[in-house]
């Protein structure tokens, strides 16, 4: 995949994430390699990302699932307040 296409997709995802409240997880990158920190695109450096660099993929997946469930719970609670 060409770098320009990746940058366009990241910008599109980041721009779309701005349409949602700050506490809503829309974009959650997963870091698989510590060396990738220095190569991380600027758009991703300032948002929350999941660190899976220790090689414990099961724990990383559990953390990711926790974020998804937490987001779903917030959305259900928000809808219930209407």
Image (spheres, grey):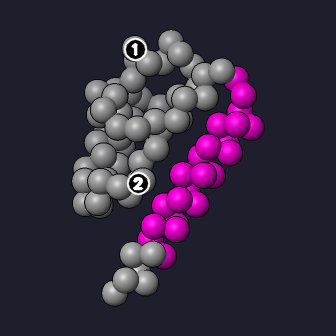
Q: Main secondary structure of the magenta part?
A: helix
Q: x, y (%) of residue 69?
A: 58, 60
Is residue 31 visible to the viewer in this orientation of the structure? yes
Local crowd size for mark 1, using a 10 Å CA cut-off: few (<14), some (14–19), many (≥20): few
Q: Is residue 63 above or below residue 55?
A: below
Q: Is residue 32 above or below residue 5?
A: above
Q: Foreground residue, 16 or 77?
A: 77
Residue that carries the numbered disc 2 in the rendered image: 26
In the picture, measured across the screen, residue 45 lies left or right of residue 51, that is left
- Residue at left 30%, top 46%? 14
- Residue at left 74%, top 37%? 58
Q: Is residue 31 above or below residue 79?
A: above
Q: x, y (%) of residue 64?
A: 59, 46
Q: Is residue 44 above or below residue 71?
A: above
> Which quarter of the rendered picture does the C terminus lie within?
bottom left
Q: Foreground residue, 74 or 39?
A: 74
Examine the structure image and report whether residue 11 is included in the region drawn in magenta: no
**SS type, badge 1:** helix
Q: x, y (%) of residue 47?
A: 35, 37
**SS type, badge 2:** loop
Local crowd size for mark 2, using a 10 Å CA cut-off: few (<14), some (14–19), many (≥20): some
In the picture, measured across the screen, residue 82 lies left or right of residue 52, that is left
Q: Check residue 73 in the rendering and tell me which mark sits there, or answer none.
A: none
Quadrant hosting residue 77:
bottom left
The residues tagged by marks 1 and 2 sit, at their Cα atoms, a distance apart of 23 Å
Q: Foreground residue, 22 or 14?
A: 22
- Residue at left 57%, top 19%? 33
Residue that carries the numbered disc 1 in the rendered image: 38
Chain-order first, disc 1 or disc 2:
2
Magenta residues (range): 55-76
């Amino acid at each position: 995949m060409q770098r320009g296409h990746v940058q366009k997709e990241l910008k599109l995802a980041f721009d779309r994430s701005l349409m949602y409240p700050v506490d809503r997880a829309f974009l959650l990158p997963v870091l698989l390699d510590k060396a990738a920190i220095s190569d991380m695109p600027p758009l991703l450096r300032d948002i929350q990302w999941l660190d899976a660099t220790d090689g414990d993929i099961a724990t990383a997946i559990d953390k990711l699932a926790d974020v998804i469930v937490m987001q779903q719970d917030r959305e259900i609670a928000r809808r219930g307040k209407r």
